[in-house]
Image: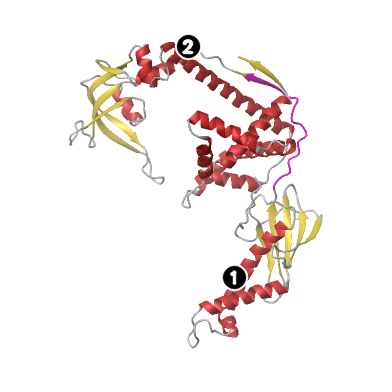
Amino acid sequence: MAERPWGFESPLSHVMQTFSREIVLMESGKMENGGTNGVDVAVEIGDDWSRRLTITVDPERVAKARAKERNQLAKSIRLKGFRKGRVPPDVVEQRFGLELDQIVQERLIEEAYREAVDSTDITPAGAASVSNVQYAPGERLTFQADVEVMPTVELSRVGGFRLKREIQPVTDAEVQEILDRVLADFADWKEVDRKPAAGDQVAVRVAPLADGEDTPTEEAKPYRFVLETGQALPDVEQAIKTLTPGESGSFMVGFPAETEDAEAEQRQLFVAVDSVEEQVLPELDDELVKRATGGAQQTTAELEEVVRSDLARHHEDEAEGKLRGEILEALIQANAFSLPRSLVNRYLDGMLRAPEDADGDELNQARESLAPHAERQIKEEMLLDRVIEQEGLQADEESVERKIEELAERSKMAPGAVRRRLEKEGQFESLRRNIAVDRAFEYLKSQSEIEETS
């Protein structure tokens, strides 16, 4: 959340809110190389998280930047009557003066903005809007950068909430559903003489029909698949369900648009059902359990016990997830704060990742519908970050090692291999973050009254 975006929005001038007159004048310090950077910044504090930076670059730095750009240009251009790299400065000025001014101005604005931000305690929440640029060769450069800063989160209350953690019991129906999935891999198919239903395997033939025709002009293509497994268009499956084996008919079927700009189509199809087969599950016995689990479980009782244990753990995870959601909601209500719009926009940009040719109206509608979700996600993250920072709940090396050992045991890998894999996939910091978040929730739970129900 502390990432600093350095980009600039375009156009350079935007309508801004009225700013208060409180001004903080801060003179920038030294560059990392030890030289004076020649940048001054005055920070004007506006409404909420708005800040206006008035930035000044001294004439000496402007002159040096312009001379550098001019010399680089002189070395790269070719002009008639001059050898490459030997074009006199006055000729460069005469031919390319305006281009030089534009290059120097843009480069200095970006550099000065970065240095100005680094010299203050400002953390931008989004891109800056630059305006009121005053520049002339050999004179000082001044401009204003309007930016929203990251909000400050103050925790006025983190506990004292009355919450529920309700764990749903494991039912026999849930257990049987899982066992049926295991049995499905060993099921047989029995042909039946009836209309097909969900889960049946059908053999069908399909062909397009010309307008006004009842019989296809080309041979129908055969297909075999299980209904309601996503292998056929919904209209095609609906048509199949109206036919018994040996029957056929013509049906209007909706086809999705092939491209974003195209519209969905309606086409007439010939559909014939040749056979319908229903699934016949085998009897679950110890021998089948050994085959299905590769010997991990030896009896039906052992398999059922494992299934019940996994389902119980799943229900506990669900209950924990709901409880965490309630805790975060209580935190948001008890510690209200507003968000900079630019921060929400950055979050939405990351969520949508829209292509350059995306429809503008559709994109705006998507952003509007997702904005409340984005705002909540940002607030949740910022509140958790604040709890972790305030209570010192960051992941230490010992906790990281314990988590790696847990992952290694679960995945049957060596701890070193797990660590290398996490580092290679860029997931190591996510692991640290997850540990810190788990610690934060344990702390938050300890601060409230939680009723356990089942």
| Image coordinates for residue 229, horizontal then vertical, percent | 36, 27
Q: Amino acid at mark 1?
A: Ile
Q: Residue furthest bottom?
A: 81
Name the N-terminal-most of marks 1 and 2. 1
Check the image and report above or below for 292 versus 271: above
Report crowding for label 1: few under 14, some 14 to 19, many 20 or more residues within 10 A (C-alpha).
Answer: few
Check the image and report above or below for 378 versus 295: below
**Over which residues does the magenta segment extend?**
150-165
353 with respect to 137 (left or right): left
Quarter assignment of residue 251: top left
Front position among marks 1 and 2: 2
Q: Residue furthest right?
A: 22
Q: Amino acid at mark 2?
A: Asp
| Image coordinates for residue 128, horizontal then vertical, percent | 65, 56
Quarter assignment of residue 319: top right
293 with respect to 402 (left or right): left
Check the image and report above or below for 44 versus 393: below
Residue 443 shows which numbered tag?
Answer: none
Residue topped by disc 1: 103
Residue 172 shows which numbered tag?
Answer: 2
Quadrant for the C terminus, please.
top right
Q: Secondary structure at mark 2?
A: helix
269 with respect to 179 (left or right): left
